Structures are given as C-alpha cells and as structure tokens.
Image (spheres, helix red, strand yellow):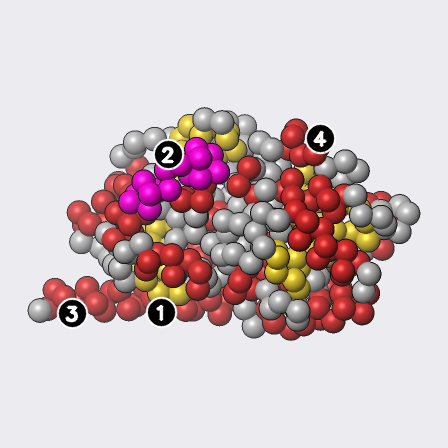
C-alpha cells in the first residue's frame, strides 16, 4: 500500500503528533508498505531527523506567533506534487489544521480516500489562549473532519466530543507505547541521587511547557516536605514556571533512552493538562512502572484506573494534585502496587498492535471507496 502521511509536526519536533506520525511511518515500512511524509520544514539550524524510516518532504514554514516552537506550513506546490508523484492508495492526515486541510483538498481532487487522525483539542486551546473562540474552533474541526472518509479518535472522551459536535464517521484508534524502551528496569540510583541528593521522593512532569498544560498546578507539590519536583521539557512557559515552582529541577528537553531513564527513576508521575486527547506521557510513565496522578478529563480517563494504576483528580485543582501526591508519598506499598499494575496494563499496547489496527482502517476506507465507485 502506498501512503502519504500529511502531518502538522514531525521530528525533530517533540510532541504527540510528531511521535505518532513517526511511529506510523515506521510501522508501515516494517509491514512492507511505502509511506512518504509531508510536513512543515523545521526551524533554521534544526536538522531533520536522520532516523526517519522513509522519504520526508518539507514544505516552507514560519513559526507560530507567540509560540516559535510550533511551525506553520506556508502555501506550497510540494504537497500536491508529492501526492501526484507518489500515487497513494490512502492519505493519512495527522491532526489536520493547516497543512492537513490542504492535504485533504489535494486528496479529494485526486479521488484518494483520506483518514484524519484527531489529536489536538483545538477548542481547549482556544479557551486557554484567547479566552473564547471555542465554538469557532469546533466549527473548524467539524468542517475539516467531515471531509475525511474516516476520523480516528484517540480516546473515548475525544470520540464523544467529536460525535457530540457533529463530526461523522468516527472510530476509536488508541496510541501505542514502546514497552521495550520505557521499562522499570531503567530505574537509576545515580540519577536519583543527582536529582534528589537528600533522598526526596521524586515527582516528575514530562511534556511541553505551555499555558494549556497548566504545569503551575504543581506549585503545591513543591511545598510538600521530602518531595522534589522534576520538570522535563521546554516551551514558552519555562521562565514563568521557574518562578512559580520553587525548588523544582528543570531538565529541559530530553529524548530517547535518556528520557526513558528519567521516567523509570521517578516515584510519581504527575500530569496537569486538562486538554489531552490522549496523553502519551501517561502511557510512557505507566510502561516505566510509575504510578500516575492526572486530571479526570480527556485521554487520562481511558489510561488511568483510579485506585489501581494511579489517581485521577478534578481538572485545574492544585489542592487535589497536591493531596493525591501526598497520599502516594506516604504509602510506598501503594506506589509499588500502582506501578506494577500500570506496567501490566500497557504491556499489550505496542505500536505494532495499534499500527496493524490502523492498516485495517486504511483497508476499510479503500473498500468503501471501491464499493461507492462500483455503485
């Protein structure tokens, strides 16, 4: 099968959209298919990811105003030319918004079926950054995804939101996790001494540092006795968070095996963002055998079994986050039990498994198109 993956983000970017697009391309190659990736060009001075498993076509881009880590694709003929050249059987649209909309239009002109993967809560971002605009964001989402042959939602909460707002032809497609890379055995005593030299309990957050992530909710955790907060990631909120989280350790952006070692060396993983359509870092913490504290909203509702693999708390409630961490800090036996259960829960959620499910979705839309043409 020939596939063009049109993605708003791709490595060297570090985010859920980029990671999922990379894993999708790898799995297609592993299964003998032929993908090509089309994505915005990285910032000047940033080299494309040499580990890409297939050809990557970069279209001109500019930084998003106020958030330069995000690149927005400019109009370009490269996208349409790539589709014509590659002659895809299906077009995969990863979090379509700007480049993905153009990919949808190009696929429609060529009569190629399109599968849109919903990954970003644009309505939540509109509330965070503009204080309004949620209705307009949903109109945009509905318009974009209604043009696809199929929309794939990463969680039951996302699926419900899409259907509630009138998006047709939605099915559930969850994300995989690299259980070989993220594993409890990587727990590192030397790293733990470096991060918490007085033997403190280590509570970690991993992810982008941006307003919608609400990492400032960890301020109360920083005040707990015997607790050290460790923040891994970068983004526009970094300077403010360094002021708001006294005593926290900021490690910056980490990837690969180094990131896996950090995950496994945590005692508790705390996620604070209420707008996650899935939340890959929660799965990576669980694969690392670490109990999770997360908001009872969006993707974490599917991932965290409250009272078995972690604790779910009301969204945007700093006191609830602090109290949940404090309860786990006081109970080593519960932390160990939650961590073991978390690892067992995700062991079957490999990228190979979910990748095969994705290929099944591709085959379904191709079959539906053939049936429609024949009729």
Distance from Cα at disc 1 to Cα at disc 2: 30 Å
* Place of residue 87 in the rendered image (x, y in percent of width and height, measured from the top left): 25, 52
- Residue 77: name its quadrant: top left
* Place of residue 329 in the rendered image (x, y in percent of width and height, measured from the top left): 79, 58
Residue that carries the numbered disc 2 in the rendered image = 73
Mark 4, secondary structure of its residue: helix
Distance from Cα at disc 2 to Cα at disc 3: 35 Å
What residue is rendered at 30% in x and 31% in y? 75
Distance from Cα at disc 3 to Cα at disc 1: 16 Å
What residue is rendered at 28% in x and 50% in y? 142
What residue is rendered at 29% in x and 56% in y? 167
Residue that carries the numbered disc 1 in the rendered image = 360
Mark closer to the observer (4, 1): 4
Sequence order check: which comes first, mark 4 or mark 3?
4
Mark 3, secondary structure of its residue: helix
**Residue 371, label in figure:** 3
Q: Which residues are magenta?
A: 126-140
Q: Is residue 276 left or right of residue 184?
A: left
Let me know if residue 138 is in the magenta part: yes
Q: How many numbered callouts?
A: 4
Q: Toward the viewer: 253 or 317?
A: 317
Sequence order check: which comes first, mark 1 or mark 2?
2
Residue that carries the numbered disc 4 in the rendered image = 243
Distance from Cα at disc 2 to Cα at disc 4: 34 Å
Sequence order check: which comes first, mark 2 or mark 4?
2
- Residue 80: name its quadrant: top left
- Residue 134: name its quadrant: top left
Mark closer to the observer (4, 3): 4
Mark 2, secondary structure of its residue: strand
* Place of residue 273 in the rendered image (x, y in percent of width and height, measured from the top left): 56, 48
């Amino acid at each position: 099968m020939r596939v063009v993956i049109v993605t708003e983000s791709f490595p060297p970017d570090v985010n859920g959209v980029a990671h999922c697009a990379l894993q999708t391309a790898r799995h297609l190659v592993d299964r003998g298919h032929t993908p090509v990736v089309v994505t915005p060009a990285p910032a000047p001075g940033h080299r494309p990811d040499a580990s890409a498993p297939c050809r990557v076509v970069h279209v001109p881009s500019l930084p998003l105003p106020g958030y330069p880590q995000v690149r927005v694709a400019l109009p370009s003929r490269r996208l349409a030319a790539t589709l014509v050249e590659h002659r895809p059987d299906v077009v995969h649209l990863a979090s379509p918004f700007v480049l993905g909309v153009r990919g949808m239009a190009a696929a429609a002109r060529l009569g190629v079926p399109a599968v849109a993967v919903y990954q970003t809560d644009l309505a939540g971002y509109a509330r965070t950054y503009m204080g309004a605009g949620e209705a307009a964001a949903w109109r945009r989402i509905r318009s974009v995804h209604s043009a696809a042959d199929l929309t794939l939602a990463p969680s039951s909460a996302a699926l419900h939101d899409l259907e509630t707002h009138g998006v047709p032809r939605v099915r559930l497609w969850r994300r995989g996790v690299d259980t070989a890379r993220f594993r409890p055995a990587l727990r590192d005593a030397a790293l733990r001494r470096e991060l918490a030299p007085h033997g403190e309990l280590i509570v970690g957050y991993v992810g982008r540092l941006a307003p919608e992530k609400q990492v400032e909710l960890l301020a109360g955790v920083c005040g707990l006795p015997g607790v050290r907060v460790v923040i891994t990631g970068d983004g526009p909120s970094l300077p403010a968070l360094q002021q708001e989280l006294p005593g926290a350790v900021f490690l910056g952006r980490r990837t690969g095996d180094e990131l896996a070692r950090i995950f496994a060396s945590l005692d508790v993983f705390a996620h604070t963002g209420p707008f996650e359509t899935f939340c890959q870092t929660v799965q990576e913490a669980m694969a690392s055998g670490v109990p999770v504290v997360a908001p009872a909203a969006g993707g974490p509702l599917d991932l965290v079994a409250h009272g078995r693999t972690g604790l779910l708390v009301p969204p945007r409630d700093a006191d609830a986050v602090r109290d949940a961490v404090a309860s786990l800090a006081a109970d080593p036996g519960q932390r160990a039990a939650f961590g073991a259960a978390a690892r067992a829960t995700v062991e079957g959620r490999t990228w190979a498994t979910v990748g095969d499910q994705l290929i099944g979705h591709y085959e379904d839309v191709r079959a539906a198109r053939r049936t429609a043409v024949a009729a």
